[in-house]
Image (spheres, helix red, strand yellow):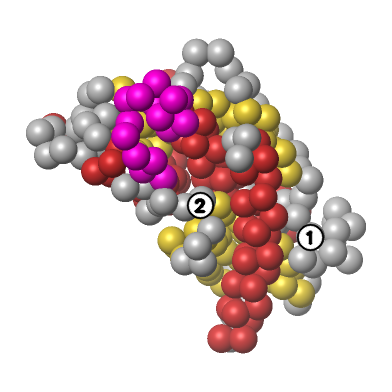
Amino acid sequence: MRPSGRAPDELRPISFEAGFTRHAEGSVLASFGDTKVLVTASVESNLPPWLRGKGKGWVTGEYGMLPRATHTRGNREAARGKQSGRTQEIQRLIGRSLRAVVDLEKLGERQITLDCDVIQADGGTRTTSISGAWVALRIAVDKLLAEGKLEEDPILAQVAAVSCGVYNGTPVLDLDYPEDSSAGSDGNFVLTSDGNIVEAQISAEGETFDQEGLLRLMRLAEIGCKEIFAAQLQAAGK
């Protein structure tokens, strides 16, 4: 029995509340159970120096966790003067995931930054961030298309992410914190709506797994992402 009472292949309740903030070109409050992430998409004409004049744009991500997103207060990274290795890793993952489904040449010479701020954490903050970031990106790009600033849609497919792991010997989908903190093995899967894999991060946490175990987790991820894809489209008005 899972602590939440969910079936092994059952997601936590998920929602994407689009237009959550006023000023950003795209915004959404992404919720996976008690994990809540505010994602905003900002469209800028500034590009990294190495991309200027090359006729294509850039999509990147930034990630942060509010001090009381967890059970105890954590110090702001800005106060420490540097980001943790974990934060940098997650930011790179968010950027890679979104760029995997964007034609950067069709985006033109502009940058879209997805800021993912964790308001409340209960496991799966990076997967919630990626799934919500696609919705914010979709909204921002739709505005550019409606304003005639883009001739073609640069978004090629959807992208979503979900965690899977082995809890008490059973493969389960979408781990919350009690499961994540005691799972025998766990991983994060980033999948696209056209059936491709962007990334799979899987590791044993004291309990190794065989090839069949890996395939079981992969199948669970596909089940979860299919449901996430539907929720994304609904939130983005598609």
Name the residue nearer the viewer: 118 or 178.
118
Majority SS type along the magenta span: loop
Left or right, 177 with respect to 22, comes to right
**Measured from the top left, where is residue 118 in percent x and y?**
58, 32
Left or right, 66 with respect to 175, comes to left
Residue 234 found in image quarter: top right
Question: For the point 51% across and 31% down, which residue is it?
Answer: 139
- Above or below, 168 against 232 in this view is below
Amino acid type, label 1: Glu
Name the residue nearer the viewer: 156 or 128.
156
| Label 2 SS | strand
Which residue is disc 1 drawn over?
10
**Measured from the top left, where is residue 220 in percent x and y?**
67, 69
Q: In the orientation shown, which residue stands out farthest toward the top?
A: 22
Which residue is disc 2 drawn over?
159
Amino acid type, label 2: Val
Q: Which residues are magenta?
A: 141-155
Q: Is residue 189 magenta?
A: no
Question: For the point 47% across and 52% down, which residue is it?
Answer: 157
- Above or below, 24 against 157 in this view is above
Q: Is residue 150 magenta?
A: yes
